Image (cartoon, rainbow, N blue to C red):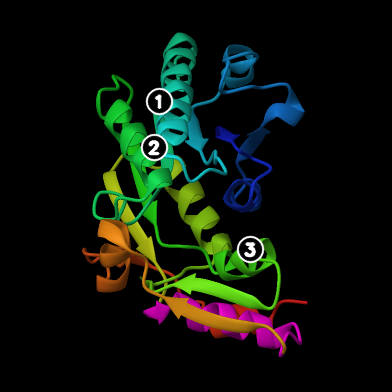
Amino acid sequence: MRVAVLGGSGVAGRYTVDALRADGHDPVGLSRATGVDLLTGDGLVPALAGAEAVVDATNLATMRATKSEAFFETTTRNLLSAAGEVGVGHIVALSIIGIDRVPFGYYQGKVRQEQVLAGSDIPVTVLRSAQFHEFASQYLERMTGRLVLVPTWRVQPVAAREVGSALARLAVRSPVGHQELAGPREEVMADLVRQVARRRGGARRRIVELRLPGAAGKAMARGGSLPTVDGMRGTQTFADWLAGQA
């Protein structure tokens, strides 16, 4: 089965392409590097030609709600238009657990993405995922200096590899509406960042947990990012994932 993967060079996208190929399917990773610009729509129609399903794993690095909303509304409408033109039969979109409970700027764009998809004539499956195990490492890398402030945040992280595998499985099956995928256990984000710092020999860096002000901070601390349904669960714990990192 031919499956186009938007954001195919990203963290989840790469694992989706690998999982599809391992299962004998024909994945096509699409990104700006392959001549496809989802924001403008350039190159999208010919790239989707012949694909029976599309996985949208695109991402945007921003904390601003307006920028996130504009990006995801535009890219999703471009995807639906192109997919309808070439006869794609199924769209699978990667989203995030808790976007409707944690009023975080970036999440507002994901909410808008799901709203646009809800009006699609093409069958859609939305996979809401918990934060990736990789997130704690990425967070630490973005911070500079000895003091690292981490919001009070209850999470149930999952390995990005398992997210990619789940997206691949959903893409080649019949649409199922909404699904959730979280890891095997609840964690505290500050503890995860500390573990990464210790693993990297960063004993001199001080990780401080800080309750964020406002509604978003309250929701994060109270478990707004935790799964609320008996959905899919990953098997790899954060500790096991970290032990396998270079």
94, above or below 146, in the image: above
Between 221 and 18, the residue placed more toward the observer is 221
Q: Amino acid at mark 2?
A: Gly
Q: Amino acid at mark 3?
A: Gln
Q: Residue at x 29, y 55 (%)?
A: 102
Mark 1 Cα-neighbour bin, 10 Å: few <14, some 14–19, many ≥20: many
* One can see residue 237 in this view: no
Position of the N terminus by quadrant: top right
Position of the C terminus by quadrant: bottom right
Count of marks overlaid on the render? 3
The residue pinned by badge 2 equals 109
Earlier in the chain: of badge 2 and badge 3, it is 2
The residue pinned by badge 1 equals 73
Residue 138: numbered disc: 3
Give the residues drawn in magenta, as a range.
185-203
On the image, the x and y values in percent for residue 214 come to 28, 59
SS at mark 2? Answer: helix
Q: Residue at x 63, y 36 (%)?
A: 26
On the image, the x and y values in percent for residue 61 come to 57, 44
